[in-house]
Image (cartoon, rainbow, N blue to C red):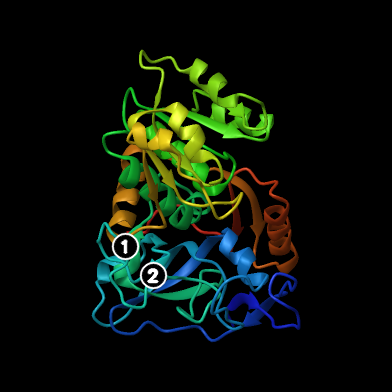
Amino acid sequence: MPKSVSISKIDGKPGKVYYPLSLKEVPKPSPKDGEVLVKIHAAALNHRDLFIRQHLYPAISFSAPLLADGCGTVVEVGRGASSTWEGKRVVINPGEGWRDSLEGPEDKGGYRILGGTKTIPNGTLQEYMVVKESELEEAPAHLDNIEAAAVPLTGLTAWRAVMVKCGPHNIGPGKNVLVTGIGGGVALMALEFARAAGANVYVTSGSEEKIAKARELGARGGVNYKDEGWDKKLLGMLTTEKKQFDAIVDGAGSDIVEKGARLLKAGGIIAVYGMTTGPKAPFFMQAVLKNIEVKGSTMGSRKEFTDMIDFIRRTKAKPVISSVARGLDVDAINGLFEEMKKGSQFGKLVVEVSKASNQSKL
């Protein structure tokens, strides 16, 4: 029988408990009207999966497979779904409830993400997965299965922050973009998208090693945010005539508006997709006087998912892979979670569920 990985319930308070992984044999699902059956080749972790195991995420499920990111091959097509999907290698839209609005999810129930919760009792950490055909995109041919699986959730988050919230006027050739906290999946995808769009990208990190790796990936330069006066040092690195940044893509919060007011041009953008250092980012009069815009940014719509995949296909952009667990091996998957807990990864953590050709079988 096919296998899937979910979590098992044990006693413990939220934030203190750490639910163990559970490998289960499950019936092979069958697609219904408008659905397809996908043989999953690879699935990727996100921080929400760690939060689920720590009971720090709402509506957790002890039966739904974990993970929201996945790449696989369509092996069966349900009634009403297009037969052209059969044999194609696909990536799966990681959420539902948001079609194309620029403002946010249209669904009254809000945006719902795959993996490990009761809101959508489905996830990618399983050998076979039934998916609505409307939630599929053909995987870019230049990405292997592991790379393709690494794209959806972090890619969509980075896409909205970079290309929707900052762009298009502040993203492109000759534009200076700062991506803070390089090393995580979203920050690395933000670097890749801004670089592929032609911008001069700079980074910050608390690790000199991560800054060096970012330069290898196309960053023009970077500074250690632990250093005093790092913002002045960063401005000194700019090679364009205008010694200011056009946009900042931030996942830390804290003093980013204060620093941004010094770094950004008048009317510059700060797109904030997270606040890892604390739930507040004070707004200063200096930012008001420079007409700085601070924009919150979440994941993205179904339309933005399509736009992102098209851009990746066109520009041959790639995610960064940190570690891969081979097969549905609970110990190996636990090892990926341990990397995430320590924060030692540089890029995405991926489970190779099954081996397959990287190309669509048309």
Q: CA distance from mark 1 to mark 2?
A: 9 Å
- Residue 189 visible in the shown view: yes
The answer to whether 153 is drawn above or below residue 228 in the figure is: below
**Would you call the spot at circle 2 few (<14 residues within 10 Å), some (14-19), or many (20 or more)?**
some
Please name whichever residue, 111 or 49, is drawn nearer the observer in this view of the structure: 111
Residue drawn at point x = 66 percent, y = 71 percent:
53
Which quadrant is the N terminus positioned in?
A: bottom right
Tell me the residue that label 1 is attached to: 104
Q: Amino acid at mark 1?
A: Gly
Residue drawn at point x = 41 percent, y = 84 percent:
30
Residue drawn at point x = 26 percent, y = 76 percent:
81
Q: Secondary structure at mark 2?
A: loop
- Spot occupied by residue 192 in the image (x, y as percentages of width and height): 45, 37
Q: Secondary structure at mark 1?
A: loop
Q: Is residue 296 left or right of residue 205?
A: left
**Discs 1, 2 touching: Cβ within 8 Å:** yes
Tell me the residue that label 2 is attached to: 111
The answer to whether 20 is drawn above or below residue 222 in the figure is: below
Q: Amino acid at mark 2?
A: Tyr
Residue at the front extreme of this rendering: 285
Which quadrant is the C terminus positioned in?
A: bottom left
- Spot occupied by residue 27 in the image (x, y as percentages of width and height): 54, 86
Please name whichever residue, 357 or 303, is drawn nearer the observer in this view of the structure: 303
Q: Is residue 91 left or right of residue 171?
A: right
- Spot occupied by residue 303 in the image (x, y as percentages of width and height): 27, 58
- Residue 318 visible in the shown view: no
- Spot occupied by residue 345 in the image (x, y as percentages of width and height): 66, 46
**Would you call the spot at circle 1 few (<14 residues within 10 Å), some (14-19), or many (20 or more)?**
some
Q: Earlier in the sequence, mark 1 or mark 2?
A: 1
Q: Is residue 166 left or right of residue 209?
A: left
